[in-house]
Image: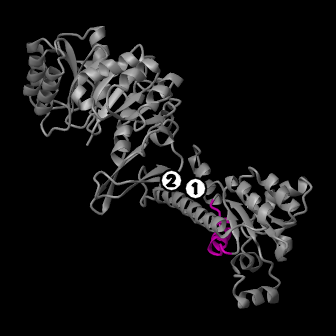
Amino acid sequence: MTQLTALLSVSDKTGILEFARELHALGARLLSTGGTAKLLADAGLPVTEVAEHTGFPEMMDGRVKTLHPKIHGGLLARSDLPEHVAAMAQHGITRIDILAVNLYPFEATVAKPGCTLEDAIENIDIGGPAMVRSAAKNWRDVTVLTDAAQYAAVLDELKAHGKTSDKTRFAASVAAFNRIAQYDAAISNYLSALQEDGSKAEYPAQMNSTFVKVQDLRYGENSHQSAALYRDLFPAPGSLVTGKQLQGKELSYNNIADADAAWECVKAFDTPGMSSGSSAAACVIVKHANPCGVAVAATPAEAYGKAFKTDPTSAFGGIIAFNREVDGAAAQLVAKQFVEVLMAPGFSAEALEIFKGKANVRLLQIALPPGGARPWDQGRNAGDSKRVGSGLLLQTADNHFLKREDLKVVTALQPTAQQLDDLMFAWTVAQYVKSNAIVFCGGGMTLGVGAGQMSRLDSARIASIKAQHAGLSLTGSAVASDAFFPFRDGLDVLADAGASCVIQPGGSMRDDEVIAAANERGIAMVLTGVRHFRH
């Protein structure tokens, strides 16, 4: 068998020494550059420097070392074309069978605070991407590796067959082109955001996004639409796509959209760094992207029981999320209803046994995020996007979390400590309800939810009607409105229903009229100064 030649040149040295040792044991000739060559030589491996191989010295601080015909000829020459083989022989070019390259750490460099343009430019790799593209283009002859996770499988094939399979080489080629696309996108995003004064614009002149497909879906929002789920290249810990499905049917497009709404809401009651974080168990029931029942209690079972009471009709076929491990008691209650998806940080052995009898119920286990100041620490997106006709709307995500000290009491009647608890709870829920949103709460649970209406007045009426249908009293309840009341009529509907206190952003031209109405009706009102439109 012809001796294999492997060119190893990596910035991230993870696993490269072990990989090189195995290649050497298989009889491969090792070529390398710079720090990688030194690492291999120091370990006692016979390695040829690229400069020695090409007969051309490395120069310009390493900028020029692999950009040479003996490198790219060795990567690009096709073994099935006699003229290519003849050209190699004529010019003394050796075929390179394996290329292991990972690129200068551009993304990590620009993510550092205080990164300068000079730092960024110096970490734009030229020779690496050029070699990767050459090898990936010639995948029938060259195995190109851009990630240490690929080393083991390649070694297994070499040991078993003396070569890699077409399937492996093609998959490696696709992965290589994907990596180059990611790399170039990061460079474009960074440079497109630079301003004349050296600062960075929040939104670059060209926006390049990278997502990795998780799975194809049976269909989209409706059966005549196709769909697939993608994830961020580096998903935040505690986000939906990091979850593991333990049982049940394949998730649908609507399941995933609703599950995300439920998980985002339930996290708000637990994650450190968020205003509503607490030690209580929380349960969120979502139907068609809107919370139809939310509650906190001492145990998951109690939280579920309270959340279910809000709207038992809508809870049928809903998505349920807990911020605590689902134990046997909670599982027994949930199993009594038709549920599409059940999410939690964990499930006890008893709970898993109970749901074995409900084979179609999709169980998702998702670790809670670590918590902290950044959206990433909270398992949240830093930005949101929305497609419009031939365009894209981008914005920072609505990751604002209210603190009690931010509240401004504007009525003669001051809210009690219990009312403040209820108001904060109601405000947290309202953030996840489609606009216009009105949420009645009390005692750590939702009592009535009005969502997605063109008129805030109608949302208030619907929330009241839903509470009546569920047999829940609104006397003394707390109410959250996701945006200001344009007129006093909405406030009057809440008062007529039994509300004792209201939380809303304020900012209307008729704030004085609404505040006067609250004083007239004996209602305590606090303003947040922030709204939570959700379309």
Verify whether residue 126 appears in magenta.
yes
Main SS, magenta region, reads: helix
Left or right of residue 204, residue 95 in this image: right
Q: Earlier in the sequence, mark 1 or mark 2?
A: 1
Question: Does 102 sit above or below residue 94?
Answer: above
| Residue at 11% across, 33% down | 458
Left/right of residue 493 with respect to residue 448 in the rendered view? left
Magenta range is: 124-140
Disc 2 marks a residue whose amino acid type is: Gly
Q: Quadrant where the N terminus lies? A: bottom right
Query: In the rendering, at what x and y percent does residue 102 appear?
Result: 68, 58
Residue at figure coordinates x 19%, y 16% from the top left: 472
- Residue 268: where, in percent of width, then height? 40, 28
Indicate the amino acid at tag 1: Leu
Res. 67 image quadrant: bottom right
Q: Position of residue 514 (x, y in %)?
A: 11, 23
Identify the residue under disc 1: 117
Identify whether 123 is placed above or below 442.
Answer: below
Badge 2: residue crowd in 10 Å (few <14, some 14–19, many ≥20) = few
Q: Between residue 517 and residue 334, name the one nearer to us.
A: 334
- Residue under numbered circle 2: 198
Q: Secondary structure at mark 1?
A: helix
The residue lying at 76 percent from left, 68 percent from top is: 163
